[in-house]
Every structure is written in C-alpha cells, then in structure tokens.
Amino acid sequence: MDLHKIRAVPTLLEISNDLTERFIHAENKTHSATDIIVEINSLLYVDSKKPIEYEVKVSIINLIESSLLPHQKESVAFAKLKSHILSNLDIMSEKKRFPLV
C-alpha cells in the first residue's frame, strides 16, 4: 500500500476550521455563506456514501460560530447570515465533496 496515495479524511473540526478561515478572509461574506452552504450540503460519510445528517451540519455551523467569537467583525457578519445558512442546509444531499468517517 502506497501511503502517499491515501487521502486523509477531514474531521468535523478540520472542516469547520477551514470554513471559518475562508469566511474570515472573504471579502464578500454573503458569497462566503453560500460557499459554506454548498460545502456542508456536499458532505458524505466515507463508508455509506450517504449525506451527513442535518444535526451534524448544524454542529459544523455552531463550530464555525464559536471559532469566530474572537473576530468581532466576522462574528457579527456570521450571526446576521446564520439563519439564512441554516435554512438552506439540505436534510438530504446527493452531492459529494468531503467524505467523513
């Protein structure tokens, strides 16, 4: 087995940290919120290839929100967009992007 060809599966914390960083550095926070929705709706479990549950998606949003607390400007912007993000999370999604364990 070639260990260089094994793709590490990101954890929920790694995914939320990545999305947090992208939100912080985004010039257009509304566009970044749309990207967050698309990314989260595309998450699948590795074994079953089924979309992650809505509750897990909400957990990622909560992790992002918590990570933004030290960044007041971004935290306020995210708080204004949070209900929009939550209302656009799919209960089931057919897309594939970042599989989870």
Image (tube, rainbow, N blue to C red):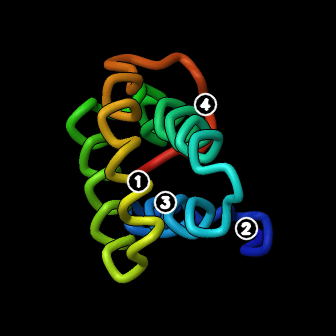
Q: Mark 2, mark 1: which one is toward the viewer?
A: 1
Give the label on residue 43, or none: none
Q: Check disc 3 and give the amino acid type.
A: Ile
Q: Secondary structure at mark 1?
A: helix
Which callout, 3 or 1, points at the residue further toward the start of the chain? Answer: 3
Q: CA distance from mark 2 to mark 1?
A: 43 Å
Q: Mark 1, mark 4: which one is toward the viewer?
A: 1
Which of the 4 image quadrants contains residue 30? top right
Residue at left offset 32%, top offset 51%: 79
Q: Mark 4, mark 2: which one is toward the viewer?
A: 4
Write down the residue under mark 3. Answer: 15
Which callout, 4 or 2, points at the residue further toward the start of the chain? Answer: 2
Image check: 101 left or right of 32? left
At which x and y percent is residue 83? 30, 34
Spot the residue most to the bottom. Answer: 70
Write down the residue under mark 2. Answer: 1
Write down the residue under mark 1. Answer: 78
Mark 4 packing: few (<14 Cα in 10 Å), some, or many (20+)?
some
Q: CA distance from mark 4 to mark 2?
A: 25 Å
At which x and y percent is residue 96? 61, 30
Q: Mark 3, mark 4: which one is toward the viewer?
A: 3
Q: Secondary structure at mark 2?
A: loop
Q: In this orientation, which residue lies closer to the viewer: 49 or 13?
A: 13
Q: Check disc 2 and give the amino acid type.
A: Met
Which callout, 2 or 1, points at the residue further toward the start of the chain? Answer: 2
Residue at left offset 41%, top offset 23%: 88
Which callout, 1 or 4, points at the residue further toward the start of the chain? Answer: 1
Q: Check disc 4 and give the amino acid type.
A: Lys
